[in-house]
Image (cartoon, coloured by chain):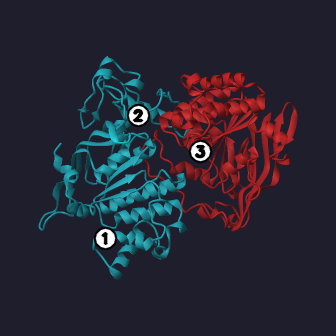
Amino acid sequence: MSSDNFLLEVKELRKYFPVRKGVLRRVVAQVKAVDNVDLAIKEGETLGLVGESGSGKTTTGRTILRLIEPTSGQIMFRSKALAGPGKDYVQIDIASAPRKKLKALRRDMQIIFQDPYSSLNPRMTVGAIVGEPLIVHRIARGKERESRVRELLASVGLKPDHMKRYPHEFSGGQRQRIGVARALALDPQLIVADEPVSALDVSIQAQVLNMLEDLQQEFGLTYLFIAHDLSVVKHISDRVAVMYLGRIVELCVTEELFNHPKHPYTEALMSAVPIPDPDYEVERILLEGDVPSPVNPPSGCYFHPRCQYAKEICEKEAPVQRDLGGGHFSVCHLADQLSLRPVRLQ
Amino acid sequence: MPLIEVKNLKTYFYTEDGVVRAVDGVDFAIEQNKTLGVVGESGCGKSVTALSVMGLIQIPPGKIEEGEILYHRDGKVTDLTKLNPKGKQYRSIRGNEIAMIFQEPMTSLNPVYTIGNQIMEAIVLHQHLRKKAARKKAIEMLYAVGIPVPEQRIDEYPHQLSGGMRQRAMIAMALSCNPSLLIADEPTTALDVTIQAQVLELMNTLRKDFNASIQFITHDLGVIAGMADDVVIMYLGRIVEASEVHAIYHDPKHPYTQGLMNSIPSLATAKVRLVPIEGVVPDPFEVPPGCGFEPRCPQALEICKTKIPPLKELSPGHFTACWLYE
């Protein structure tokens, strides 16, 4: 695969948080929240990032935007905002970009947060919230700004007269729309959507998911869609990456992942998802115990203590990411030998 | 024979801003040894219904306006709404014969007592065992819910346990007195899917072992499909559809139920564009005068705006409250 298809290419990304103890605040351990993550996102596609709590998916998303400083690694990004005159884009490493450039880079990449209640300032009107990025980046002022805000609100299905209202006057779904409008204000290329629908009621979830799909079509957006709900991720993603304890264990095209899983964790995760059909018979693979602590992860493959297929090698050696063909990546010693159970379609 | 029959239950809250009719005329029954799923979005009154059965509605501002909650045991019938919620009789039932587990195991366990202490409290109170025997029973219960090394874990505090383990401890506490009814209010919503699968499996096994009925409250149609025998769908304090589980999923009658089914993505179906329910749940202070779902309903008729549809039996055991079927 040639790399020029990719809007974003993450290589060996790591984020370790030190654990400090004692009077001297000495570092006694490291939480490996993101541990050697490789992924790439093509322009206009949606990459789903799925995992259980503590798997490091949120930290990955935020480190990519450099809202969290990475410990090491490369985040190559094709920036429009930084492109010089006569150029369409320029390649830049977000991980090492100087502060000055970072501000301009923010125009290219935005985030939508999970909690629509705490991510909007309750003292600002909707107009001020959505228009703030335009002021910060000196894009539009006065009347021009107002008409841009009106446009943005219309594109997320809100009315112009909502501008003068405050966040508390809106329901959860509407607030999430305001957050999306704010993210769209700077006409970004990449949007990191961090659990954008998990705080919403089911009937509202569908409204927001459809809107995100429509906006992607309209504005040619690229999404990194972070979620714990496999059904939602399957619905919206072109490709899916599965994370476990700070590492990506499997990454491939959505259909392929659900039809031919190549990692035992993916298999177990899929079998645990409740299916809204009383006649659907699943053989649940019940994982023993909990996700181990990322401070003190198991040796070798992090999943081996809970894996029903684990062999001796899994305990000793950490598996590396391998392409099993057609861009289907799995991090499992036994990926070729196992025939894992797919999701049975109805 | 039903274990619990709720008849025309109305629980209102009198607040400074007006009256909230959180539960407004709800009827259902839970059969012995069966699981009843109660499904609805936030604000539909599913939790208030459960708290009304438990006698845990705070009075004031809350009040059970009308209705009966008939509890059948040993051939006798007790109307729980007639009992004093703080009285001796209710206290002998609550936590003993009817027990409840909550959504957030961290906030519903007391952080300053060990889990053993909290489980033993119920056992000592209701079963009149001595402390030593109660401790033995508590260890047995922790073992039954699959907590490893229970004799050690019993002396740990809630913060020392993971989310899944805490929920197991809550279940152990609720089941420690062999209740005939277990009310579970979103018991797995705060848990990861793999842990959720463990807890659901556990609840199904325990229901059989302990011969209990379960009232399972959730917004998750996937979870209900695998757990419930019967389902009621609630919207704005009323039941809009009730039936045995298969009919609800394969032949939903009420436009709201149909809307819910079309708006959830499923892992087991090919991708289709979701059909959301338009609009939002109305403000509880400004409930529509007719059918609560009318403002969002794609099939609404003229009559829906003014008259509340009654719950009607369309086929044996399948009820819906909708004017389309009159």
Across the whole image, how many numbered discs are drawn on residues? 3
Marking on residue B107? 3
Residue B313 % position (x, y): 74, 47
Residue B211 % position (x, y): 72, 27
Residue annotated with mark 1: A136
| Discs 2 and 3 lie in a common subunit | no
Chain ID of residue with mark 3: B
Query: Label 2: how many residues lie within 10 Å, few (<14), some (14-19) or many (20+)?
Result: few
**Residue beneath the point at 62% across and 63% down:** B282
Q: Residue furthest front?
A: A23
Give the image quarter of residue A277: top right
Q: Residue furthest left?
A: A86
Q: Nearer the viewer, mark 1 or mark 3?
A: 3
Give the image quarter of residue B61: bottom right
Chain ID of residue with mark 2: A
**Rendered colour, chain A:** cyan
The chain letter of the red chain reads B
